[in-house]
Image (tube, coloured by chain):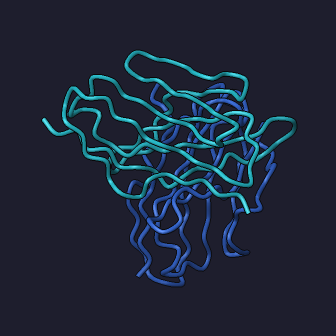
Chain colours: A blue, B cyan
């Protein structure tokens, strides 16, 4: 199994541009999470999907952020328009047992907005 | 508000010794606690999960304890090796319907040869 696959690994974009981050969870995992990690705030949960349905999006910072999971093998996190304060590492994680089991994280996307 | 505290300062330890990392929490009643390892430029890797009714759990050189009275978990690495150098994160969660898993900010461990 290739694990959780995220793309791109690095993204540098100008303020105001649209950014799309992609994630392929582990096959058979029915829970998918998007996290953001910064030095100041650590790992913050942005949104949680279960069986492709968004269950908790209370961590999404504002309307500029949106996430979709059109099928069990693909999810996207979109930021439009991007701002410098969005610069962070964005992780996707998946799990087979909801929140009571360990998560498998991808390698992350390092986003820099200039 | 809920708070999870891990030593923000790095922990330096001599190779072969036991490393002990601490995770304290307040205003929280977790049903379980997870520990993860994170290397630079990589995502966290799940190591162990311990439930509130378990006092201790072991996996190879790793041992985790969970004291709900002290509101604390200790993470031990015995016979530490330079390859154990990484940042270690604890994460707390509740069961009974969906509840968020909340991560601590992590403690950086450096094992010195």
Q: For the C terminus of chain A, give its image quadrant.
A: bottom left
Q: Is residue B85 left or right of residue B2?
A: left
From the top left corner, tell me how far across and down residue A62 is, in percent: 71, 74
Identified at 19% across, 36% down, the residue is: B14
**In the rendered image of this protein, does residue B51 appear above or below residue A20?**
above
Viewer-side residue, B79 vs B67: B67
* Residue visible at 61% across and 65% down in the picture: A78
- Residue A50 position (above or below residue A90): above
User: Between B53 and A99, which is closer to the camera in this rendering?
Assistant: B53
Quarter of the image where one finds residue A9: bottom left
Residue depicted at 68% across the width and 27% down the height:
B51
Task: Count the numbered circles shown.
Answer: 0
Percent position of residue A30, x then y: 71, 32
Which image quadrant is residue A71 in?
Answer: top right
Nearer to me, A92 or A12: A92
User: What residue is drawn where x is 64% and y is 55%?
Assistant: A45
| Pick the front one: A100 or B60 | B60
| Farthest left residue in view | B113
Q: Is residue B95 left or right of residue B65?
A: right
| Residue A39 x/y as whole percent | 44, 65
Left or right: residue A6 compared with residue B54: left
Is residue A33 shown above or below B80?
below
Tell me if B41 is positioned left or right of A51 in this view: left
- In percent of width and height, residue B87 lies at 38, 46
Please identify the residue farthest to the front as the structure is shown. B70
């Amino acid at each position: 199994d290739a694990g959780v696959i995220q793309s791109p690994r690095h993204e540098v974009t100008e303020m105001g541009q649209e950014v799309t981050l992609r994630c392929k969870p582990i096959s058979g995992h029915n829970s998918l999470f998007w996290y953001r990690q910064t030095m100041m705030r650590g790992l913050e949960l942005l949104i949680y999907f279960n069986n492709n349905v968004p269950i908790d999006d209370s961590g999404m910072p504002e309307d500029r952020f949106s996430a979709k999971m059109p099928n069990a093998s693909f999810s996207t996190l979109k930021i439009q328009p991007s701002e410098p304060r969005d610069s962070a590492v964005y992780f996707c994680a998946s799990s087979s047992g909801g929140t009571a089991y360990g998560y498998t994280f991808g390698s992350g996307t390092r986003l820099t907005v200039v | 508000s809920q708070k999870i505290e891990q030593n923000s300062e790095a922990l330096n330890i001599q190779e072969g010794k036991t490393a002990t990392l601490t995770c304290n929490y307040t205003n929280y009643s977790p049903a379980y606690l997870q520990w993860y390892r994170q290397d630079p430029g990589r995502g966290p890797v799940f190591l162990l999960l311990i439930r509130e009714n378990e006092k201790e759990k072991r996996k190879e050189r790793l041992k985790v304890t969970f004291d709900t009275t002290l509101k604390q978990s200790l993470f031990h690495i015995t016979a530490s090796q330079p390859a154990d150098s990484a940042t270690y994160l604890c994460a707390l969660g509740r069961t009974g319907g969906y509840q968020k898993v909340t991560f601590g900010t992590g403690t950086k461990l450096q094992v010195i040869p």
